[in-house]
Amino acid sequence: MNSKIGIMDIGSNSIRLVIYEMTETGAYRIVQECKEAARLSEKVGANGRMEREAIRSIAPLLRQFMAVCHMHGVVRMRAAATAAIRNATNSDEIVQWIAEETNLTLEILSGEQEGYAGFLGVVNTMNVSDGIIIDIGGGSTEITLFRDRERLHTVSFPFGAVNMNWRFGREVKNGEWSPQQIEEMESFVRSSLQNHDWIFSNPGLPFIGLGGTLRTLAKINQKRLDYSLPVTHHYEMTIEDVDYFYGSLPHLPYEKRKKTAGLSKDRADIIVPGLIILKTIFEAAQGSAYLVSGAGLRDGLFHELVNAEQPVVANPLITSIRNILSFAVPVSEAHVKRVNEYAVRLYDTLAGGTSAAMDKRLLLTAATLYKTGAALNYYHFRQNSVFWILHAGIGGLSHRETVLAALIADYHPKNRTPRLLRTHADILEPSDEERVHRLGSLLQLAIGMDRSESGMISSINPTTGDDALHLRLESKSEPILEQRELESVAKDFQKSWNLTLSWSILPSSNF
């Protein structure tokens, strides 16, 4: 029986609740998320205390979040507080007040714990081996260095977008920051980094951003560029992209900045200090590019709770595919496994080379998810599967790989494929059109060899020679549906690979 798990994050800027549904085999998905701005870091007085009245102001929200958990039947709950409460001089008292007001048991995360949870959120959902993670919250900023998917260093600084806005932006007139105000904040951030040599000694790594600052910049940039895949997870921004915002957003009047497409009104003031923190640390560390992670602290807290002994997943892509297939998707696991095995066998016979690892990831994704759209409508499952693959936020794939996997899964060379190639030309590379035709036609051939989804064909032996591919197939009985499908897809395969296709069918030696 599936169980529900609640993760509550009481942050310096906002309070969030995420509810996960988890199967007995460990697959999971998010079934509810609630968020409310709280700006707790602004409720800390000059003496460093947060008074009980501030806790009373958020108590109704916490009680409603707990009611949501009760309605969903949550059986395990983890509630964690970050910088605003952690840095308050009366943090223990705050925990007691929250318990008295709401019956909620709250743990206060250290900066190290917060950084580690963010690291788990990244490495469990992205195919990135080395990088620097930056989590700009409302009241703190965590920086984590990892290599070979292992965390090496984490540091937490007691400044974030909200409290730095209060400290450096109070004198800003009409929301327009002066060069002097920007320089004062940059200087403060740079001086805070000085005792952490590892930040400066690992140049050329991608910066992976958690939290609202980089995610918001990504949304604004996608609107600005009319980007064809409005998904923030694994979205990449160049140095020039962020420099553009650095030269524009701080100098906009607040009322005009609020109207920026992709920028929510409750972040219009704190986007500037967040941007200054981000760019200053990026330049100090000599980063190479900006990547956005849609997964972070709450995801990491979830993995720590349910997989305490081994919270780092072995393969983000395989984990993500398992999660998708485990929830009401009418696809035979044995069938898609056979299709992928056939596709890889054909690929190894025909291709290989420097792109083999990427191509096999694409084939794995397309082969296992090509029929997920049947959950919506069987008769249009291929088109529905395209949308599913593009927007499901599949872990372990870049945006380019996501688009390629969708195109390969729904290969239709005379109509849909050319249209999708044009739609996503801003993401794809010139060589990708040939890749789509080759891998798409290869996948259709693999699907055809198990058209009945019954494993009728028990083994395949592909061989090449004289500009031809021959398939020696062993079958348990006459594979009528499979033969018909091979005949249907043969022409597209032959055109894409410039090979003649033939096959022979023999009785299976196992029967």
Image (cartoon, rainbow, N blue to C red):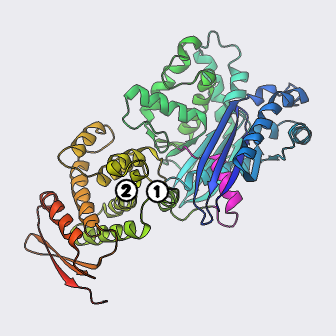
Residue 471 drawn at (x, y percent): 18, 75
Residue drawn where x is 64% and y is 59% of the image? 2
Q: Are marks 2 and 1 in contact (CB under 8 Å)?
A: yes
> In the rendered image, which quarter is residue 161 located in?
top right
Residue drawn where x is 77% and y is 32% of the image? 61
Query: Which residue is tagged 2?
Result: 371
At label 2, the amino acid type is Lys
Residue 113 drawn at (x, y percent): 73, 51
Residue 10 drawn at (x, y percent): 75, 39
Residue drawn where x is 83% and y is 33% of the image? 59
Query: Which residue is tagged 1?
Result: 329
> In the rendered image, which quarter is residue 237 located in?
top left
Per the rendering, the mark at residue 83 is: none
> In the rendered image, which quarter is residue 415 located in?
top left
Segment colored magenta: 293-311
Apparent side of residue 231 relative to residue 282 in the rendered image (left or right): left
At label 1, the amino acid type is Val
Q: Residue furthest top?
A: 174
Q: Look at the numbered disc 2 and give the secondary structure of its residue.
A: loop
> Mark 1: few, some, or many residues within 10 Å (few <14, many ≥20)?
some
Whether residue 382 appears in this view of the structure is no
In-front residue for pair 190/48: 48
Q: Give yes or no for residue 310 being in the magenta stretch.
A: yes
